[in-house]
Image (cartoon, rainbow, N blue to C red):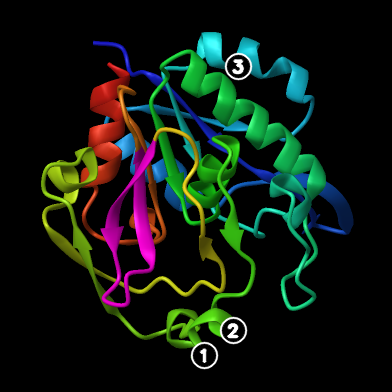
């Protein structure tokens, strides 16, 4: 059986090899390795022309919206908080168009961290620009503190990972208003949304944490199974 092609979003950054420093398309290898372990064929997608996304979607069987710099406030009609790293508008435009095209085409989607936020914004949702200020604490931003996430067992996410998961997932932004058709399906103990999915779609799931960094490949298995 042929492996389904799974697109993995990437970003432009300066990279060095030998004596050269050039702009490069970068993607942490953990995403591609997780897709391959699940039986998919990973393909890295450079954030170029948003008008080409329909061509991408026609050739792909699934999409991973990866982590990285937070979605810029301009993408959802908000202000850019000065405490957040500068937005990457080119990447935002490309990935928003890609997410919307994948939703229209019923192509399976897994959004990870920034990717969850991107999926929410693509569906018309908004974000909390600086979570520590709203909560009056920075517990979600702690880089090495695990916390327990409760998951709806009836959701696609719950079927992939079970009714709870322990994660280390520092973040300073979060979902505020859910986009059209999206449901919250996972929560921290303070009710901050940690997982979402799109009703009626074959598989469109977003999570706040990074499953590609853990030992449980269940979410990628579920993505690739839906892609088949």
SS at badge 1:
loop
SS at badge 3:
helix
Q: Residue furthest bottom?
A: 137
Q: Residues within 10 Å of mark 2 (few under 14, many from 20)?
A: few
Q: What quarter of the picture does the C terminus occupy?
A: top left
Q: Which residue is mark 1?
A: 136
User: Which image quadrant is residue 52 in?
Assistant: top right
Marks 2 and 1 sit apart, C-alpha to C-alpha, by 5 Å
Q: Which residue is mark 2?
A: 133
Q: Do we see residue 108 in this rendering?
A: yes
Q: Residues within 10 Å of mark 3 (few under 14, many from 20)?
A: some
- Which residue is drawn at the image coordinates 64% and 36% (left, top)? 95
- Which residue is drawn at the image coordinates 43% and 86% (left, top)? 139
The image's mark for residue 194 is none
Q: Does the segment drawn in magenta span residue 153?
A: no
Q: Is residue 105 left or right of residue 89?
A: left
Q: Residues within 10 Å of mark 1 (few under 14, many from 20)?
A: few
The image's mark for residue 56 is 3
User: Which image quadrant is residue 54 in?
Assistant: top right
Nearer the N terminus, badge 1 or badge 3?
A: 3
Q: Nearer the viewer, residue 117 or 169?
A: 117
Marks 2 and 3 sit apart, C-alpha to C-alpha, by 39 Å
């Amino acid at each position: 059986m042929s492996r389904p092609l799974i697109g993995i979003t990437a970003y432009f950054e300066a990279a060095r090899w030998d004596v050269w420093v050039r702009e490069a398309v970068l993607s942490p290898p953990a995403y591609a390795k997780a897709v391959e372990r699940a039986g998919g064929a990973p393909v890295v997608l450079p954030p170029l022309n948003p008008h080409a996304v329909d061509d991408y979607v026609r050739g792909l069987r699934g999409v991973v919206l990866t982590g990285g710099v937070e979605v810029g406030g301009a993408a959802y009609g908000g202000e850019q908080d000065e405490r957040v790293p500068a937005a990457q508008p080119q990447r935002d435009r490309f990935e928003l168009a890609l997410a919307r095209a994948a939703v229209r085409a019923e192509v399976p989607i897994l959004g990870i961290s920034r990717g969850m936020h991107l999926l929410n914004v693509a569906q018309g949702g908004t974000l909390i620009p600086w979570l520590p200020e709203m909560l009056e604490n920075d517990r979600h931003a702690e880089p090495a503190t695990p916390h327990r996430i409760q998951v709806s067992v009836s959701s696609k996410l719950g079927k992939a990972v079970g009714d709870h998961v322990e994660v280390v997932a520092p973040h300073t932004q979060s979902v505020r208003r859910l986009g059209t058709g999206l449901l919250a399906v996972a929560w921290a103990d303070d009710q901050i949304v940690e997982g979402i999915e799109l009703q009626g779609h074959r598989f469109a799931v977003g999570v706040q944490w990074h499953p590609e960094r853990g030992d449980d490949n269940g979410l990628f298995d579920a993505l690739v199974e839906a892609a088949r």
